[in-house]
Amino acid sequence: MIVHLKPGIAAAKMEELAVAHQAIRFHDDTRNVLVLSSKITELPTALQDFADEFFVTKSDIQLASKEYHAHKRAITIGDVTIGGDSMNTMMIAGPCSVESREQIEQVAQMLKELNIKTFRAGCFKPRTSPYTFQGLGEEGLKILAEAREKYGFNIITEVKDSSHVDLVIEYADIIQIGAKAMYDHSIGRRCGQTKKPVLLKRGFGTTLQEFVQAAEFILSGGNPNVMLCERGIRTFETHTRFTLDLCGVAFLKEYTNLPVVVDPSHAMGYRYGVPDLTRAAIAMGVDGLLVETHPTPDKAKSDAAQQLDLDQFRRMYGTLQPIANAIGYKMI
Ligand code: PEP
Ligand code: MN
């Protein structure tokens, strides 16, 4: 149950109520909120004098639920808005990793030409092996900050573990929590303390329920700016890297109030499938797409097989706007 508290209650009293009801308490810019267990379906007597309104939810998907917010939340990043009534589909594009200033410059020029506003690249890479490229770390963040300065992009880059979460929050316009970090609650809780938008990726072995509950760790810290990203789940199939769960995307759209982003690159794992999957996802009416592109993908230091080269990206991008328009959306 979510309870909006009346204004003017002393902090000590709110804390007492939270402790007594094993509730999480946060301030959402306009009011103080208590989140109790979802098993509680009637307003406890002790809260009756203090509650303005309350919301009963079907499960511990609470702050992210349609029972709480019937309409999709809007998120504004610089001069870009997604969700709400915007009908915008935001293209997030860039290489898997920051490798050099020249590489970022080449991709940045192409994205600027296409009027794409959101640039992605990882500096702390969650690699499967410790013996492969792990990312440039802060040096990479500085290169991204230069690209933002020069081209006016919003920058999205990922947090791999809690050792550098503050650094990424400082540099990024959107914080990406990668699939392998979805369950790292120290990252989730830290991201709950900022208002910067967070793109939370679905762990590839997690259910939709577990995925959205991970988002609750961020929302219940007081950060309402969370996007959910479907990036493929592991199934019995071996011909593709993962399986893009578009059924899951339909579920997230229907039952949550958070903007939904689809990442066809990591799901497919091979560049030949990425343009088709991108078009399929746009046709579903999503709030964002995340596509990896690199000047020389075969030489990429991470995710070489799935990144589009710049011409492939440009050609694909040229086909997207009419698909978005056909269902009332606009690619931005
Ligand atoms: C990435 O976006 O480059 C990445 C590592 O993604 P994921 O966490 O989905 O594997
Ligand atoms: Mn990648």
Image: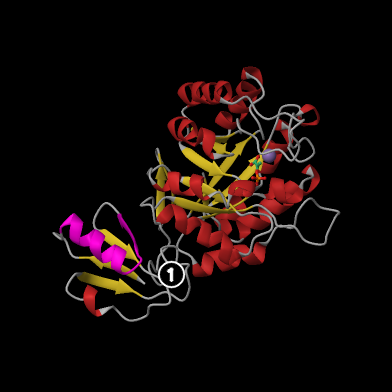
Residue 4 vertical placement versus 86 (above, below): below
Name the residue furthest top.
Answer: 102
Tell me, yes or no, if residue 281 can be seen here: yes
Depth order, front residue of 276/129: 129
Secondary structure, mark 1, is loop
Instruction: Identify the residue shown where x is 38% and y is 45%.
Output: 193
Q: Mark 1: which amino acid?
A: Lys
Q: Which residues are magenta?
A: 10-27
Depth order, front residue of 256/288: 256
- Residue 301 sits in quarter: top right
- Residue 282 sits in quarter: bottom right
Decide if residue 123 is on the left or right side of residue 50.
right
- Residue 18 sits in quarter: bottom left
Depth order, front residue of 194/254: 194
Q: Position of residue 8 (x, y in %)?
A: 13, 59
Residue 23 vertical placement versus 263 (above, below): below
Q: Position of residue 308 (x, y in %)?
A: 73, 37
Q: Position of residue 181 (x, y in %)?
A: 59, 47
Instruction: Identify the residue shown where x is 63% and y is 27%.
Output: 98
Q: Position of residue 147 (x, y in %)?
A: 52, 24
Which residue was labeled with disc 1? 66
Magenta run includes residue 172? no
